[in-house]
Amino acid sequence: MTIKVHGPSYQYHNEILEKPELILVRDHHYNETDRCFHLQKLLENSQCDPRLHTVVFDHINIHDDVMQNYNFIYYPGFLAREEREFNNQSIEIDWNNRKALFNFMINKPRPHRKILLELIDQFSLIHYTYSLAWKENHVNNIRVTDYKFGNEIVMGQGIKNGSYKNALTYDGLLKQTVFEPSCISLITEPVFFEREAILTEKTIMSVYSGTFPIWIGGWRCADALEQFGFDTFTDIIDHGYQTEEDPVERCRQAVQLNLELLTNLTRTINLVEDCRSRFEKNLNLLKTNVFHRTCKKIIEKQTSYKTVRGLQMLYRVT
């Protein structure tokens, strides 16, 4: 039997796994309300050795938390799908109009996204572009934005894009207004409490816009991106924050360790211009389907037909 788990909504209800199973986990899976991994409860209450199960993640790239000794396959199926969507969008690149130091994009109100708004005030950061898809901002005085095509559903804090793909939203709404005019992307991936690395379309947007990436709250996101061959500009950006155990302090250090970059407009613009060939190399990795190729390599290494079939269910490689 192959077990399918939707990470954000899954809760353990005393299910008992009697024998080794293949478990496919879509999306992030840490429960911020219960402050636990419900998947851990499922594994540890097995009648068999929980290490005999094979767990496949389509979003998680690194797990350094309480389940790190289990049998995981990190399969970047989500990134491969997003990569394909962005590449098929035929996005025209314009990296010649840098005016702002950094950008940020906030939709759902996760803890580290509110912390980022607080940090902008705390460090008196200016010269930024942004998207803040809330009806009202109760954290600080930054105005909310209204970037939408027209049919999206605007909630109190967030927006439902409906059928609009992330690549289309980037190309049609965010590329010229938020990303390409800036030098640095302050990225808030959907991970905060847990010691897991997750990369999504937010990181892909940074690559497409040729901006320096700094992950606010993310655990080892720079390490995760480097695993695929990307340059994270460690000679320019201090990613020392990424393994700070305290997630609140991790957010603060991401800004503080890179404060010179986030405040010196002239110097940062010059650095971006000097790194153009490195940005182009990163973009070329995306355009040559690095995540798809990684998925293909993972499938080719498998000896179990059941595992191959499960991987193909998450993201089909032809």
Image (cartoon, helix red, strand yellow):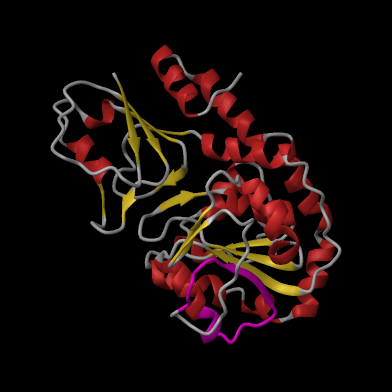
Residue 13 position (above or below residue 313):
below
Residue 76 visible at all? no
List x then y, in percent, for residue 229: 66, 42
The image quarter in which residue 275 lies: bottom right
The image quarter in which residue 87 lies: top right
Residue 227 position (above or below residue 259):
above
Which residue appears at 56% of the width and 43% of the height? 163
Which residue appears at 53% of the width and 34% of the height? 77
Q: Is residue 277 magenta?
A: no
Q: Is residue 129 magenta?
A: yes
State the residue in front, 29 or 72.
29
Instruction: Say whether residue 301 is left or right of residue 36.
Output: right
List x then y, in percent, for residue 249: 42, 73
State the residue in front, 140 or 157.
157
State the residue in front, 1 or 256.
1
Residue numbers of the magenta segment: 119-137
Instruction: Say whether residue 260 is left or right of residue 74.
Output: right
Q: Residue furthest front?
A: 151
Instruction: Say whether residue 43 is left or right of residue 194.
Output: left
Residue 315 visible at all? yes
Residue 315 position (above or below residue 268):
above
List x then y, in percent, for residue 234: 65, 60
Which residue appears at 13% of the width and 37% of the height? 14
**The N terminus appears in which quarter of the rendering?**
top left
**The C terminus appears in which quarter of the rendering?**
top right
The image quarter in which residue 172 lies: bottom right
List x then y, in percent, for residue 154: 49, 61
